[in-house]
Amino acid sequence: MNKKILSIIRKKNKTKIVSLSAYSKNVVEILDNYCDIVLVGDSLGSVLYNYKSTREVSLDTMIEHSKSVRLGVKKSLMVVDMPYNTYRNSKEALKNAKKIMSKTKCDALKLEGGKKIHEIIRNLVKNNIPVMGHLGLLPQSAKNFKFKGKNNYEREKILKEAKLLETAGVFSIVLECIERSLAKAITKQIKIPTIGIGASNNCDGQILVFDDLIGLNPINVRFIKKYTNIRKEISKAVSTYAREVRSKKFPLKKHSY
C-alpha cells in the first residue's frame, strides 16, 4: 500500500486529517505545506466552470486539472474524483481509473456511493487502485441538497454502507452533510478514517473547497467557514492597478526594459 495512504490511515484516533479541494498548481503549491490530503474535486464544475451540477464535468477536464495539481503536490496525498458516468460498471470503472492514474500520477481516486458501487470499488482495489469512498450527500446523484441522517432509515442505511465500503477496501470515507451523531457513530464503528464536510468535528478529518475557504466563491452554505475575503483583496488590487494605469503611474521606468 502507498506509504502516504498508510500514513493517513494511522492518523485515525490520533490526529485530525487536514484536506482541501483545489484545481491548479499555483494554489496547491501553497496547500501542500499544510494539508494531508489534496483532492481534485469535480466541484470544479460549479466553482470554475459555472456548471449547474458536477454531472457536466468530463473525464478529460478532471485529468487536465489533475495534471496541473500534480505539479504542485510534493508531500500531500493526491486524490482525484472520478466524474459522473465514468464508473457505471466494473469494466468501465477500471478502464477510466487506469487512465486517470496513468495520466495524472495521482495517489488515489474518490467514488461516490455505497451499496450500488461497492463491487466496483472492490474490483478497483483488487487491481491496486486505491479508493476513497463518499457517503451522505452525493452531488453527482442528489435530487436535493439536504443533510442526511435525519431519520432512522437514512441513518441505518448510511452506517451499513460505511461498513460495506470498508470491507470493499476503501482507505477512508468522505462524509458529506451528515447529522453529527451519525458521523460520530460511523467514525467510531469503522477502522478507517472519516473526512467530514458539513458532518461535524466528530470525523477524523475535514475537507473544504479552497475557493470557498478564502471567500473567492461567493457561496453561503452553513458548513463553510470563510477564513478570509479574497474577493475584497482582489477588488482592491485591481482597482489600484486600473487607477495607476489611467493616471500613468504604472508602469514606471523600473517596470520597463
Image: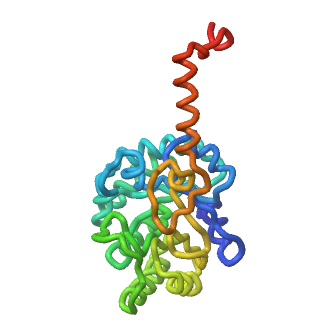
Horizontal arrangement in the rendering, residue 77 relative to residue 109 (left or right)? right
Examine the rendered structure and indicate whether residue 40 appears above or below residue 164.
above
Query: Relative to the observer, which residue lies in front, 145 or 246?
Result: 246
Position of residue 135 measured from the top left corner of the image (x, y, whole percent): 43, 74
Horizontal arrangement in the rendering, residue 188 relative to residue 82 (left or right)? right
Name the residue furthest right. Answer: 14
Q: Residue at x 55, y 70 (%)?
A: 195
Query: Relative to the observer, which residue lies in front, 126 or 42?
Result: 42
Horizontal arrangement in the rendering, residue 68 relative to residue 54 (left or right)? right
Position of residue 39 measured from the top left corner of the image (x, y, whole percent): 51, 56
For the image, the number of numbered tags is: 0
Name the residue furthest bottom. Answer: 152
Q: Residue at x 71, y 75 (%)?
A: 14
Query: Relative to the observer, which residue lies in front, 122 or 134?
Result: 134
Position of residue 51 measured from the top left corner of the image (x, y, whole percent): 31, 50
Position of residue 70 measured from the top left corner of the image (x, y, whole percent): 54, 44
Q: Residue at x 65, y 61 (%)?
A: 3
The image's colour scheme reads: rainbow
State the quadrant of the C terminus. top right
Examine the rendered structure and indicate whether residue 187 appears above or below residue 42.
below
Q: Residue at x 39, y 72 (%)?
A: 137
State the quadrant of the N terminus. bottom right
